[in-house]
Image (cartoon, grey):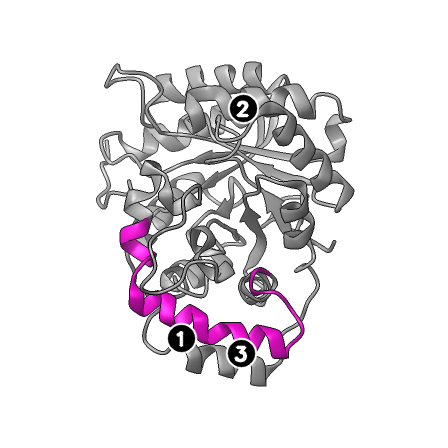
Amino acid sequence: MRYRQLGSSDLQVSEISLGSWLTYSGGIEADRTRACTEAAFDAGITFFDTANVYGQGAAETAWGEILSAHPRDSYVLATKVWGPMSDDPADQGLSPAQIAQQIDASLTRLKTDYVDLYQAHRFDPSVPVEDTVEAFQKVVEQGKARYIGFSEWTPEQIQAGIDIAGPGLFVSSQPQYSMLWHAPEAEVFGLCAANSISQIVWSPLAQGVLTGKYKPGHPVPEGSRFASADMAVSQDLVYSDATLEAVQRLVPIAEQAGMSMPTLALAWVLRRTEVASAITGASRPEQVHANAAASGIALTDDLLAAVDEALGDVPVTTPTLAPGAQPGILHR
């Protein structure tokens, strides 16, 4: 496993990280959750990403039980705030009160005194951005988080946050990024790089589409990720016959290069120096090790050209709002 610096922080994160969206929030049993996490340590993965909203605390609770058995300085722990935590419509977002309440709740579930990275899961245009930034600054000042990041903010929202916070508070951006989703390349990558903010990308395998297991003209396999009702929005974004046909054109390219489809897809996102880590999911330990194998693999120019030709105009290349993301900025 290789490691990269996370933005302007002093954190070194593994190129492949382990996430917990669908799997550790109750999607797999506790024994397999533990086995996957231990497999991550065995593979050199030291970066773990979760969120308060995953299973409304279940994912954080699961990792609190598992990670607390490891020395706290042996891993980098990231969580997020923004999503709805109950039926109360006020129990969500990025108000100062919500951030203060949710960081304490997350730390309790995670069984730790601090997280290395606390992230805004989305932007909250209903709260003055100054209030949100100051609330995150307070979390850092209190020692409850070492650094702050954001996920799926628009360039305008990113710039507003930087203008208020100054350099050094924000160290990471978490956008969707994959062979099928190039959207953040258009503006977000450059803006963040100019401000020493790294990318930690989610869905680098396009929710499993880039494994090649989904075939055009065939029904979604039972038990697969896209068979879940939670995946309806993502299915609309990256699951179509045209997309699946393009992915099948990648299969012989990967085979000729002597690598699996997941390895090719993960190495592709890691080819960008702006990317510090690719967040992967796993329901079995062998998936963890297979994903970790992509670290350190360099793709040749000829291979990258073949990938571009195979995908054609299928990838999303223009700035596009992610699920849940909202444009706009409110100031005091």
| Nearer to the camera, 63 or 171 | 63
User: Is 159 rendered above or below residue 330?
Assistant: below
Which residue bears the numbered disc 1?
311
Res 318 seen here: no
Q: Residues within 10 Å of mark 3 (few under 14, many from 20)?
A: some
- Please tell me which residue is depicted at 26% across the width and 17% down the height of the picture: 90
Which residue bears the numbered disc 3?
304
Q: Amino acid at mark 2?
A: Glu
| Nearer to the camera, 220 or 297 | 220
Which residue bears the numbered disc 2?
60
Question: Which is nearer the N-term, disc 2 or disc 3?
Answer: 2
> Horizontal placement of 197 versus 188: left or right?
right
Where does the image place residue 218, in percent across and percent down from the top left?
A: 34, 59
> Horizontal placement of 197 versus 294: left or right?
left
**Magenta stretch mostly in which secondary structure?**
helix
Where does the image place residue 101, in percent across and percent down from the top left?
A: 43, 15
Where does the image place residue 62, in percent across and percent down from the top left?
A: 58, 22
Quadrant assignment, res 311: bottom left
- Counting every numbered tag in the picture gives 3
Secondary element type, mark 3: helix
Quadrant assignment, res 117: top right
Quadrant assignment, res 78: top right
- Please tell me which residue is depicted at 37% across the width and 71% down the height of the picture: 245
